[in-house]
C-alpha cells in the first residue's frame, strides 16, 4: 500500500491541475444536484419485534382511521393574562382554527378541545391533537405550512399558540459552531507550522471535502430516510478528521523537504508513510461508524453511514487533492515567518520540544504516571454507573422554540404526563368475550399508581380489539413513567390466563422506552465487536500482541470516562451553566453507542499516528525507550495540534441549542481530550516503557500467516534506498518521474 500511495502522491503532485479540476467538477456537480432536491429528515424510530411496534402494526390493521404510524402534532392554545379560553370570543376562534386544521393536507383526524375535555381546569390552556395519514418523512410542505398558518392566525387573534410533536419542523441550526471550530483550527495550524500557506492547505482541502460530503448527504435525503442529526454528525466528524489527516501529511511533507528531498519526491514519500497511516485510521473510523447499522435502528444507521461517508471523503481528499495543492505551493510551504524563537530553536535542534520533554518524563516515571492516569479516568468514570437512557422529546428542544413552549405549557395546564400519553391495546381476537377482557384490563390498569387519567375502552369495527388511553402523572422521560409502562405490561400474563386476550402498550412514550432498552442492551455487544475489531486491525499494523491489548484497554478507559462526564453534566447537572445545559435529563439513548463507534475510530487515529513512528524507530534498531522518545520527537507536536483542533471543532457544537447535538459535542471533545492526552500520550508510553521489548513480541507462527500491510512504509523505504544505491552498484537506476513546476 505504501508503494502505491507513493506513486499516487507523485502523480497528483505532477498532474495537479488535472486533480484540482476533477474536484472542482465533483463539487459543482453535487452542488447542482443538492440544489434541485427537496428531501426531508426525520427522527422517527421504528424497531420491529418490540411490543410497541407490534401494537402499532395491529392498530394500523384494525384501526386504520387512527393512523397509528402517522405523524402527530399538538397545537396548544393559551389565553392572554387574566382571560379564559372558555369565553365566547376565544372559544369561537379556537373552534374555527380546529375546523381549518381538519381540512389541512394529509390530516387524518383532529380532536375537539371543548367537547373532549382538552381544556385545563382553570380554563386558560387548551390543546388539540392533529394526526396525519403519513409518517413525518412523507409530510408535504403544504401540510407543514398549514400548521404554521393556523398558529399565525391564533397569534393575531390574541392567543398564545405553540406546537409540539414530530410533525413540527425544526428550525435551522446555527452555523456558529463550525465557524468557531474553523477559526481555532486555523490558529492551531498557524502555531504548529508557523506558515500561513502550510496552515491554509489543510483548511482549504477540509472545507472542500466536508462541503462535498454534506451536499451528497443532502441529495441522499431524496431517496432514503435520514435522521435530522446525520448532517450535523457528518459535518462535525468530517471537518475534524479532514483537517487532522491533512495536518499529518503536510507535517510529513515538510519533514521530507527538510531532509533534502525535492518537492515531488517529498509528496510521494509523505503519502507513502503518513498517507498509509491516514488510510488505516480512516478505515477504522469508517468500519466503526458503518457498524452502527447492525443494531437495526434506521435513525442510528443513517447517522453512522452519513458520518462514515464524510470520513471516507476526507481520506480521499487527503490522498488526491492535498498532494495536488502541495504542488501549487511548492517550496513556499517551508517559509515560516510566523514561527517563534522557541519553535526555530527546536527546528535547529538547539532546544527540546515540549512533547519530547514530556515523553522523556513519562519514560522516567512510568509507574507513577500510569497509576495517576488510570485513577484519574476511573474517578471520572464513576458517574457512568448511574447512566439513564432516553430518546429526545420536546422537553429537550431548544429553549424558546415552539416545541419547548408547547411542552412546558401542556405540563403547566394538565401535568407532565399529557406530553406522553400511553395507548393500551387489548387484542381480544382469541378471547371468548372481548368486552369482558377489555373491562378486566381497564379495571386492572385503574388500580395502578402513577396514572393521572384512564379513558375507557373503545373497540374496532369487529369488536375484538380495544384501545384504552392512559395518561401518566410523570413526564415521558422519567423513571416513574418507565416503571408504569412495565407495570401495565405485567398485567398481560394474568389477562391472558383469565380471558385469552393479549395486552400491549404503545404510543410515542412506550416506543421511546423500547428503543432505549434496545440500545442499552446492544451497547455491550457492540462494544465487544468494536474492541475485537481494534485488536485485529492493530495486530495487523503493529505485528504485536501487547500493543493491541493496551490500545483496546485505553479505548475502554476513554469510553467510560466520557460517559461519566456526560452523566455528571447532562443528568446530574454539574457545571450545567458552564456548558449551556438548560435542564437535566437522561442521556440521549443513541449517544453511548454512537460515542463508542466514534471514539474507537479517533482512538485508533492517535494510536496509529503516534505508535507507528515508535515502531518505525524500533524496527530500525532503536532501543525500546529510545523508540518511544523518538516517536514523541516526531509525532507529539502534530498529535497535540490534531487533538486540539478536534476538541475545538467538537466543543463548538456546545453552542447548538439541541440537546443531542450539544451532548455529542461535549462527549466527543471530552473523549479526544482523554484519549489523546491521557491514554495515548501518557498511559501508552508508560506501559510500553514497563514491558520493554515485549511490547513488540509476536509468535513466529502468527507473524508468518498475517499479511504485511506495511503501514510504516518499510517496504517503500527499501525500494527507495535500492533506487538511490543503484548507480553506485553499477546497475541501471530506477527512473523517477519527471518533475514539472507550475
Image (spheres, rainbow, N blue to C red):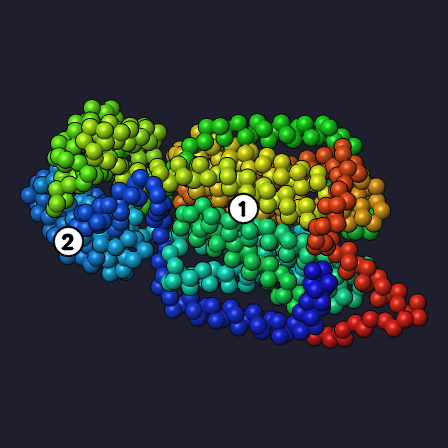
Identity of the residue drawn at 51% across and 32% down:
564
Disc 1 and disc 2: Cα gap in Å?
45 Å
Q: From the viewer's side, name the closer residue of 383 and 698.
A: 698
User: Which label sits on residue 598?
Assistant: 1
Identity of the residue drawn at 20% across and 59% down:
105
Looking at the image, do the residues carrying marks 1 and 2 touch, with CB atoms under 8 Å apart?
no
What x and y, as percent, mark residue 350? Answer: 83, 47
Q: From the viewer's side, name the closer residue of 421 and 518.
A: 518
Residue 100, by quadrant, is bottom left
From what the image shows, is residue 368 above or below residue 199?
Answer: above
248 to the left or right of 443 = right
Q: Is residue 194 visible?
A: no
Pointer 1 local density, CA inside 10 Å: few below 14, some 14–19, many at least 20: many
Which secondary structure lies at badge 2? Answer: helix
Identity of the residue drawn at 76% across and 66% down:
265
474 to the left or right of 358 = left
Identity of the residue drawn at 25% across and 31% down:
492
What x and y, as percent, mark residue 315? Answer: 60, 59
Q: Earlier in the sequence, mark 1 or mark 2?
A: 2
Could you tell me which quadrant the N terminus lies in?
bottom right
What x and y, as percent, mark residue 639? Answer: 67, 47
Amino acid at each position: 500500500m505504501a508503494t502505491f500511495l507513493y506513486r499516487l502522491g507523485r502523480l497528483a503532485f505532477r498532474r495537479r491541475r488535472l486533480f484540482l479540476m476533477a474536484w472542482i467538477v465533483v463539487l459543482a456537480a453535487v452542488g447542482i444536484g443538492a440544489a434541485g432536491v427537496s428531501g426531508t429528515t426525520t427522527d422517527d424510530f421504528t424497531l420491529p419485534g418490540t411490543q410497541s411496534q407490534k401494537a402499532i402494526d395491529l392498530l394500523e390493521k384494525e384501526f386504520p382511521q387512527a393512523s397509528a404510524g402517522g405523524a402527530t402534532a399538538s397545537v396548544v392554545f393559551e389565553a392572554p393574562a387574566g382571560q379564559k379560553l372558555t369565553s365566547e370570543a376565544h372559544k369561537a376562534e379556537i373552534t374555527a382554527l380546529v375546523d381549518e386544521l381538519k381540512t389541512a393536507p394529509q390530516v387524518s383526524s383532529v380532536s375537539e378541545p371543548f367537547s373532549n375535555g382538552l381544556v385545563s381546569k382553570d380554563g386558560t390552556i387548551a390543546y388539540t391533537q392533529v394526526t396525519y395519514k403519513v409518517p413525518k418523512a412523507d409530510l408535504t410542505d403544504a401540510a407543514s405550512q398549514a400548521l404554521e398558518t393556523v398558529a399565525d392566525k391564533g397569534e393575531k387573534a390574541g392567543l398564545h399558540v405553540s406546537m409540539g410533536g414530530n410533525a413540527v419542523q425544526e428550525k435551522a441550526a446555527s452555523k456558529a459552531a463550525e465557524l468557531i471550530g474553523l477559526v481555532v483550527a486555523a490558529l492551531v495550524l498557524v502555531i504548529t507550522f508557523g506558515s500561513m500557506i502550510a496552515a491554509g492547505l489543510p483548511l482549504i482541502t477540509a472545507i472542500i471535502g466536508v462541503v462535498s460530503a454534506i451536499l451528497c448527504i443532502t441529495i441522499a435525503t431524496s431517496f432514503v430516510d435520514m435522521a435530522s442529526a446525520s448532517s450535523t454528525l457528518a459535518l462535525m466528524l468530517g471537518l475534524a478528521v479532514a483537517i487532522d489527516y491533512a495536518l499529518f501529511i503536510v507535517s510529513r511533507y515538510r519533514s521530507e523537504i527538510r531532509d533534502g528531498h525535492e518537492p515531488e519526491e517529498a509528496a510521494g514519500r509523505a503519502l507513502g508513510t503518513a498517507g498509509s497511516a491516514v488510510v488505516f485510521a480512516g478505515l477504522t473510523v469508517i468500519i466503526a461508524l458503518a457498524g452502527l447499522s447492525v443494531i437495526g435502528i434506521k435513525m442510528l444507521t443513517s447517522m453512522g453511514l452519513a458520518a462514515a461517508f464524510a470520513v471516507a471523503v476526507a481520506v480521499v481528499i487527503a490522498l488526491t487533492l492535498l498532494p495536488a495543492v502541495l504542488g501549487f505551493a511548492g517550496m513556499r510551504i517551508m517559509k515560516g515567518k510566523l514561527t517563534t524563537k522557541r519553535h526555530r530553536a527546536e527546528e535547529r535542534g538547539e532546544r527540546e520540544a515540549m512533547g519530547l520533554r514530556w515523553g522523556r518524563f513519562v519514560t522516567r516515571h512510568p509507574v507513577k504516571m500510569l497509576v495517576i492516569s488510570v485513577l484519574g479516568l476511573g474517578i471520572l468514570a464513576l458517574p457512568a454507573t448511574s447512566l439513564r437512557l432516553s430518546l429526545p422529546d420536546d422537553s429537550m428542544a431548544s429553549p424558546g422554540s415552539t416545541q419547548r413552549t408547547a411542552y412546558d405549557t401542556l405540563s403547566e395546564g394538565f401535568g407532565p404526563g399529557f406530553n406522553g400519553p400511553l395507548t393500551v391495546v387489548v387484542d381480544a381476537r382469541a378471547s371468548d368475550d372481548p368486552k369482558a377482557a377489555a373491562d378486566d384490563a381497564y379495571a386492572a390498569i385503574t388500580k395502578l399508581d402513577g396514572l393521572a387519567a384512564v379513558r375507557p375502552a373503545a373497540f374496532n369495527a369487529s369488536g375484538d380489539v380495544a384501545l384504552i388511553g392512559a395518561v401518566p402523572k410523570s413526564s415521558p422521560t422519567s423513571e416513574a413513567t418507565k416503571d408504569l409502562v412495565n407495570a401495565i405490561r405485567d398485567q398481560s400474563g394474568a389477562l391472558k390466563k383469565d380471558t385469552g386476550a393479549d395486552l400491549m402498550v404503545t404510543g410515542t412514550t412506550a416506543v421511546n422506552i423500547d428503543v432505549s432498552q434496545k440500545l442499552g442492551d446492544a451497547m455491550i455487544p457492540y462494544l465487544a465487536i468494536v474492541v475485537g475489531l481494534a485488536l485485529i486491525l492493530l495486530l495487523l499494523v503493529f505485528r504485536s500482541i501487547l500493543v493491541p491489548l493496551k490500545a483496546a484497554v485505553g479505548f475502554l478507559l476513554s469510553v467510560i470516562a466520557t460517559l461519566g462526564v456526560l452523566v455528571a453534566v447532562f443528568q446530574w447537572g454539574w457545571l450545567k451553566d458552564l456548558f449551556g445545559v438548560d435542564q437535566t435529563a437522561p442521556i440521549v439513548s443513541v449517544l453511548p453507542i454512537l460515542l463508542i463507534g466514534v471514539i474507537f475510530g479517533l482512538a485508533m487515529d492517535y494510536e496509529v499516528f503516534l505508535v507507528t513512528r515508535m515502531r518505525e524507530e524500533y524496527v530500525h534498531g532503536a532501543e525500546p525507550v529510545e523508540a518511544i522518545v523518538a516517536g514523541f520527537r516526531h509525532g507529539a507536536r502534530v498529535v497535540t495540534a490534531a487533538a486540539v483542533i478536534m476538541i475545538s471543532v467538537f466543543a463548538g457544537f456546545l453552542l447548538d441549542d439541541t440537546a443531542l447535538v450539544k451532548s455529542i459535542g461535549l462527549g466527543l471533545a471530552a473523549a479526544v481530550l482523554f484519549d489523546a492526552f491521557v491514554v495515548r500520550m501518557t498511559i501508552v508510553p508508560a506501559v510500553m516503557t514497563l514491558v520493554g521489548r515485549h511490547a513488540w513480541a509476536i509468535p513466529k507462527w502468527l507473524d508468518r500467516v498475517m499479511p504485511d500491510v506495511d503501514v510504516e512504509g518499510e517496504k517503500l523505504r527499501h525500494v527507495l534506498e535500492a533506487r538511490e544505491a543503484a548507480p553506485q552498484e553499477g546497475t541501471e537506476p530506477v527512473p523517477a518521474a519527471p518533475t514539472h513546476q507550475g
